[in-house]
Amino acid sequence: MNDPRKTIVVTGVGVVSPYGIGLDCLQAGVLSGNCCLAPTKDVYPGFQGTTAQVCGLPHPANGASSRYSRSDRLAMVAARDAVANRDCESVAIRESAGVFMASTVAGLSEIDPGIAEDPAAWYRNDGLARAATYPPAHVADAVGEHLGVHGPRCAVSAACASSAMAIALAANMLLDGAAPMMLAGGSDALCPFTLSGFSSLQALDPDPCRPFDQNRKGLNLGEGAAVLVLETLAGAAERHAEVLAVLRGWAMTNDAFHTTAPQQQGNGLADCMRLAMEMAQVSGDEIGYVNAHGTGTPLNDIAETSAYETAFRGRSRPVPVSSTKSYFGHCLGAAGALEAAITITAIRCGALLPTLRLIDPIESSGVDWLRGEVRRSSLPLAMSVSAGFGGSNTVLIFGNRNNRS
Amino acid sequence: MISNLAAITGIGSVSPYGPLAGLIPPCLLEPESLTAWTTAGPRRAFLVKPFRPASVVPGLKTRRLDRLSAWALVASSLAIQDAGIDLSQLDRSRVAVVFGTGYGCAELTEAFFQSAAANGWRGTDPSPFPEGLANAPASHVALWHSLRGPNITVGSTGFAGETALIQAASLLRHRQADLAIVLAGDTLTRTVYEWYEAAGRLSPACYNSEPLPEGGGFVPSEGVAALVLEPAGRREARAYAQFSSVRWAAGGGVAGGCAADAIRQMLDGSVPSLTICAGNGAPCAPSSVTALAREVGGPSTAIVPAQAVAAGLIDAGGLLHLILALSSRPRKGPALLLGTSGDGGFAAVLLELP
């Protein structure tokens, strides 16, 4: 298993988050415990709630703004950030690197209810190009065109597990030899469609969310994008690239239980963690930190807690867990990639991040709820957990750059 | 490159040909007039005729589902039936579902926008929201069949169906699943149809009952095709095709822009007995995909041109193209499924026909 051709490493991380552009901004924000969630009133008439927005998102240099949705633009900026200063822009890489992007919103942010009343008139009135951004594949195409990469290109849409799944599938593709390098991640913009949808489901907490707290009331929506540069260790070594982290294991499962509700015992998610640990050839005791899905909804957090108890049963100490959605909300299809970036940051900084506003945690003998101050500790291995509507689960395990099986 | 790993052992489809298990009997279809919404004049498309899913798959409950999810359930059930698989004998945590789509549940997205138009964003109807997510059909397939393996919904401009097939094969190769249900499809809705029209992409055959012309647009279509993919030789089952290898690139194609060279390199000297062209809205002989097929195989290569009914599915037509080609009783040997994105990208899947 120590074959460098079969070891997947991360050699770049690009981020656009409510903290700003770049991993450094994200790192500084989460380490300082800065919360980006803020009262929001103007997303659509009558909306009052709490969200985390990205300010000052640059427009594409070529000025063709109407060709790109906000999700596209978030993804393009994150992808550019991922490859900056990492020698990923050589001709050879540009010609063969692949793109695997995730989105659930994609171009929905560019479409308004007028389309439903008279589509033809809506298209005539500047809607044609905006509607073309609707398919999730458009986000992958936008990234590919922006960077000029010509390898395999596709998109995944698996609700809130989407971008973690994009990273897992991109890793599979590297092992398949489909491309020497993959840019994988996710992007989703805040928009009336999703805010209204989650509001109609009564899933939003009007105040800043409190994941894993007994008094949690729901989630807050955020927006952002993250893109990881993935390649084999052999490929990275060949071009003398700095390895930021090793993707040690990944797994995907489905609850097959309900289209929106998680299975209450969290069995599907627990299976997913177990499979990822099997792939990484590590035991539960070796996982030093779990970046949880932790939406703050009553059903998710209970199921997820049960999943940790099942997956880490037999561990000598409770497993340290936190939800960083308490910092900048739930970024939907981008959440898994943003949380992968945070997990890599945690490993690199030796920092176990707390869940903000966690006062009265769900009772669990198997979980060490991180709260209060950042806990400093050497962190060879950490896990990032994602789940979504439709019962999809994805788990990624990252190790520090010296950590290979 | 993925190689020598999987066999297609079951086929199911819900298409303008009807709901069918296995191959599709030869039949020439004409586009039908749209009646689901008021149009500015005659408008035609290849449509799935309404049917009662429970009459095709007894016990199936689809009353609360949109057409895409309902068709995915029917097509997957027919493919499993065609493969002769008893799911109760399998470890269902090892069965994956991979769905390729261009627009996902467009009907429900439209319904949500309609409720916002009628009631404002504060008064939207919650029911279409979670069901309108692109991965809803795949999750319904998992839910109905109790499949707890990876559940993946992919999109890829020009070849979402081929991408689903490739990702499913990759899951089998990496032993992340022992069996995969691969699906691809879309529904035709008013906003989708009128987008094609506004973009000037429709064939003249959409406006009158003339024969399909030799180019210039396409006739929109709808439906879902499903395949069962198993590791080759896992059990004694009829295989429609063995999955042999894959090469793909997108958006400007591979290094130097020469897709044909890259595909020939993948073929490693083997000569496909036929090439199945999966057109992305370009159903007729002079399409870019046919030109690429000629370039790869030379003038003597047998080419199955893009079929109008499948080509109208645009991104999601690849699996239906494959089923139609297999249904035409092709000769044995290597066959190439070739999809293009229209901007130099391609997906090439080499199959071995037994």
Image (spheres, rainbow, N blue to C red):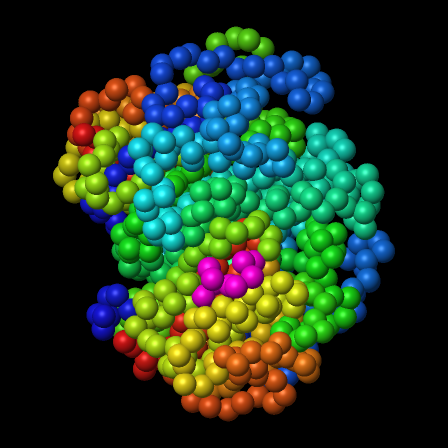
Q: Is residue A345 above or below residue A339?
A: below
Q: Is residue B334 above or below residue A313?
A: above
Instruction: Name the residue: 28% across, 34% down.
Output: B9
Instruction: Name the residue: 36% across, 70% down.
Output: A277
Instruction: Name the residue: 58% across, 10% down.
Output: B208
Q: Quadrant of the C terminus of chain A?
A: bottom left
Q: Is residue A345 visible?
A: no
Q: Quadrant of residue A298?
A: bottom right
What is the number of callouts on the image?
0
Q: Is residue A304 above or below residue A121?
A: below
Whether residue B54 sits left or right of residue B166 in the image: it is right
**In-front residue for pair B125/B313:** B125
Q: Is residue A206 visible?
A: yes
Boundaries of the magenta span: A262-270
Q: Is residue A280 above or below residue B93?
A: below
Q: Quadrant of residue B161?
A: top left
Q: Residue A349 appears at what percent x and percent y? A: 48, 86
Q: Residue A329 appears at what percent x and percent y? A: 65, 68
